[in-house]
Image: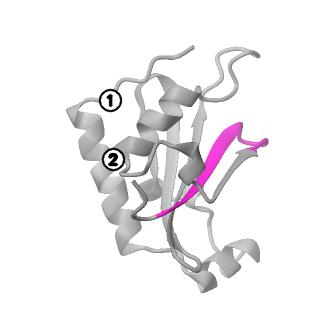
Amino acid sequence: MRILQLDKNSAKDIQQVIKFAQENVWDKFKIESLIAGDILAPGMIPDHMLYLHDGFRVVYTLEQHCVLCHHMSISIEAKNEKELYPNILAVQMIMEAFGMSKNFDDCLGIWEEKEEHAINILQEVGVK
């Protein structure tokens, strides 16, 4: 199991990604354009993406659905066949660092993205 380390530099980097997401909210039209293949996915946009200690990769957006939501995708660089996904504690630490509740019961959705070996989380903004 990998140990996630968050320090002052990672906190600064997280704040930059959050700021970019706040300035570039994904609304219905942007999401429809993404589905149609007309625009790049957030994971292909460097300002939506962040690499953390020991191979953790986070893609973060704010999306306007019925309510404003955090959408986060967390993956790791696989070192072996047994370690394809980030561990639960690291996911919760990253959620908290982005201002989200670490309680999975507070999420509107959690799903696996098999192609990327990522965990996706959708949570309403303001839930603590």
Q: Nearer the viewer, residue 106 or 112?
A: 106
Picture coordinates of residue 48, whole percent (x, y): 46, 57
Of labels 2 and 1, earlier in sequence is: 1
Q: Secondary structure at mark 1?
A: loop
Q: Is residue 82 visible?
A: yes
Picture coordinates of residue 40, whole percent (x, y): 62, 66
Q: Residue at 36% across / 23% down in the picture?
A: 5
Residue 60 higher or lower than 113, as above or below: below
- Which residue matches tag 1? 6
> Magenta segment range?
113-124
Picture coordinates of residue 27, whole percent (x, y): 55, 80
Neighbours of disc 2 within 10 Å: few (<14), some (14-19), many (20+): many
Please identify the quarter of the rendering in which residue 8 is found: top left
Residue furthest to the bottom in view is 29
Marks 2,1: beta carbons within 8 A: yes
**31 on left or right of 97:** right
Picture coordinates of residue 110, whole percent (x, y): 67, 49
Q: Amino acid at mark 2?
A: Ile
Please identify the quarter of the rendering in which residue 82 is found: top right
Please identify the quarter of the rendering in which residue 11 is found: top left
Q: Amino acid at mark 1?
A: Leu
Residue 92 higher or lower than 101, as above or below: above
- Which residue matches tag 2? 14
Q: How is the image coloured?
A: one colour
Residue 98 higher or lower than 89, as above or below: below
Q: Secondary structure at mark 2?
A: helix
Distance CA(mark 2)–CA(mark 1): 10 Å
The total of numbered circles placed on residues is 2
Whether residue 1 is in magenta: the answer is no
